[in-house]
Amino acid sequence: MKPLILIGYMGSGKSTIGKKLSSDLKYILFDTDALIEENEGRTINNIFATDGEEYFRNLETELLKDYIKKDKQDIIISTGGGMPVREENASLMRKLGTVIYFRATPETIYQRIKNDTSRPLLKCDDPLAKIKDMIAMRGPKYEACAHHIIDVDGKSIESVVEEIKNEIISN
Ligand code: S3P
């Protein structure tokens, strides 16, 4: 089966759902944020602070190009929340595999990530307002990139995983 690519805003569940799906399906999971941190030998916070967002976005694009070259099957790629914002990344992902968007409201996201300090873009005085603005801007890009959209508000990890297995993988 061609790669499953998980997209969505920070805190939408890409990593957690990716882990459960990979153990259920026996697909290898790749997490683009983790790979970038590993390749660079530093945290995303550090990359943003030292080299800026544009540098980080270039690393994301390079990773996708690498996957296209490798042409792997039976893998899951969990992406950073900003991956589909670049037009080029969105078309690389659609070419690479089946893209699944985990759509969540700003309130759901805020509840999930309000105590997490690992996201440089949410270090601000009013994170909820920032989340609302960013989702308003990114929502159409996520939707345009996705082959499938799953609304995750109020759903457990298990139920989202079941939805993917029943409605996407079995078809
Ligand atoms: C980002 C999301 C983060 C990480 C970076 C930028 C974004 O990934 O790539 O902090 O622009 O939305 P997660 O969605 O895994 O938190």
Image (cartoon, helix red, strand yellow):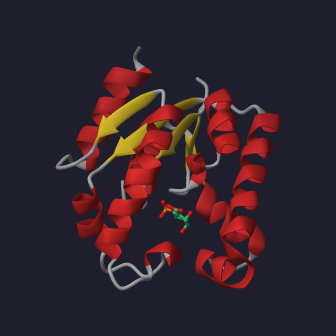
Residue 156 pos. (x, y %): 22, 48
| The C terminus lies in quadrant | top left
Q: Residue at x 44, y 40 (%)?
A: 140
Residue 155 pos. (x, y %): 20, 46
To which quarter of the image does residue 93 belong? top right
Q: Is residue 107 visible?
A: yes
Q: Residue at x 29, y 31 (%)?
A: 163
Q: Is residue 8 visible?
A: no
Residue 131 pos. (x, y %): 36, 65
Left or right of 133, for residue 7: right
Instruction: Name, please, the residue furthest toward the right.
Output: 69
Left or right of 43, for residue 160: left
Q: Nearer the viewer, residue 159 or 151?
A: 151
| The N terminus lies in quadrant | top right
Residue 78 pos. (x, y %): 53, 49
To which quarter of the image does residue 109 belong? bottom left
Q: Residue at x 67, y 43 (%)?
A: 89
Instruction: Name, please, the residue furthest toward the left.
Output: 154
Tally of marks = 0
To which quarter of the image does residue 33 belong? bottom right
Q: Residue at x 75, y 59 (%)?
A: 58
- Residue 115 position (above or below residue 68): below
